[in-house]
Amino acid sequence: MVFNAFDNRARPSIHAPRMIESIVNTLVDLIWSNALVGLCLIAGLYFSIATRFLQVRHIKDMATYLFRGRESARGLSSFQAFALAVSGRVGIGNIAGVATAIAMGGPGAVFWMWAIAFLGAGSAFVESTLAQIYKVERDGQFRGGPAYYIEKGLKQKWYGILFAISTIIGTGLFLPGVQSNNIGAAMENAFSIDPKISGIVVIALLGLIIFGGFKRIGHVAQWLVPFMAVGYIIVAIVIILANAAKLPEVFSLIFASAFNSSSAFGGMIGMAIKWGVKRGIYSNEAGQGTGPMAAAAAEVSHPAKQGLVQAFSVYFDTWFVCTATAVMILITGSYNVVDPSGGFIVDNLPGISDGPAFTQAAVESLFPNYGSGFVAVSLFFFAFTTLMAYYYFTESTVAYLWEDSAIRRKAVLVLRVLFLLVIYFGTLREASLAWALGDIGVGLMAWLNIIAILLLSRPALKCLKDYEAQKADGKDPTFKSSDIGITNPDLWK
């Protein structure tokens, strides 16, 4: 039997009035219009060209710096910062989001997820390098991200405050509900655990971590993230190998559907692009503005080094984890595709909603009766680490808004309590509303951040040029802000 961890019809939940649902869905359509999809693609293409496709030229350096750099009293190691960023990137979007993209955009949506990841690596480098250039030290630790580089680089404090508010709303209020909602639903459907119990367990475990400060978050992330990702990918590889004869057919279907040359999915290219880009951004977060907050926490000798590491985290999320899910679903035929004009183009799983149920069916095709449990456990780890990252992103933003240390400490304490409450009530909330609110949070942050990094790209590009010049001279690159004509960063003088 296939259990749908994304379907809350079988359990009690807090339902939103129809008027609220209508308003939320209208906001989602407005924010996630074709304009944002186009902006993400254009920004990624611009940064890729401007950096001469560093995501290809410097891929060796990305892997090298991933394991270099040591933790300091003020900052995390490069790998800890990478793991923290991956914590935010690898979440339920890698399971439920990929399935939704296939259901709404067809198999071709997978190609556009790959495309936005490739181009997004350029955006991730720029935003993470800027975060390093303009980071500050507060309460004995590095802080940074879009709000900081908007104020210091663009000299527009109001813009920085606007992004900070949208971040608190997005990562502090809206997005956590998507993660905890799926934990509660998955645990109930797989193991008959009451969502209230799941909520209590999650906030208890998370409380032990976040009350230990940013170092504890980094330490947990560096061990938990590789464990959960590698375990999930291994299971996916086993299923793919068991159906290896179909692999060429799957990739042929993805490419044909992506470019409108498939007879079954003709006319869906617009939906494929929209849903591939939309769920790709939701999953890898390139350009969204959360990755730079983790990047700023790293102790490195040159901002470009952490920029390269964070660019690699986009690859890790989409090319490894999302691809594992997508190929596993497609190669086993465990999916439906909605016909935009009504009904279904593909209805391989009659009566099953898109989401984790597709992945569950794929696992059960080889391991009967284990799909529900496997996806539930995977969702728990993916969502839990994402909640850790969301808390860190929100705390970094709170630290930006309150410069007075005494007020800041009190604000952080209040944040911790409120964040845990939001997570608990998220397990009881209606799933469709949680996803919609999450889309609003991601979309607002993406709009504000992408515009900011386009306006502020010059310092990041100069920083890359300085890094490459030192590498060409056989040096281990180090950075001084004055070398690229920047005078206001406090930590690089």
Image: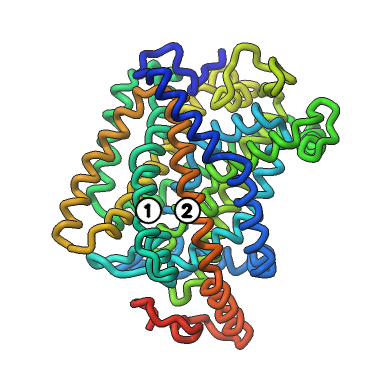
| CB-based contact (under 8 Å), mark 1 and mark 2 | yes
Reply above or below: 179 against 86. Answer: above
Q: Residue 76 got which mark?
A: none
Is 247 or 282 nearer to us in this picture? Answer: 282
Reply above or below: 221 against 180. Answer: below
Residue 427 in view of the camera: yes
Q: Which residue is mark 1?
A: 162
Q: Which residue is mark 2?
A: 448
Q: What residue appears at the point 43 percent right and 29 percent down from the top-left corner?
A: 434
Q: Where does residue 227 sit, x and y in percent of width and height?
A: 47, 45
Is 44 or 468 nearer to us in this picture? Answer: 44
Separation (CA) of disc 1 from disc 2: 8 Å
Residue 76 in view of the camera: no
Q: What residue appears at the point 56 percent right and 63 percent down from the top-left corner?
A: 454
Quadrant in which residue 198 is drawn:
top left
Reply above or below: 178 against 337. Answer: below
> Please, what secondary structure does the residue beneath circle 1 have?
helix
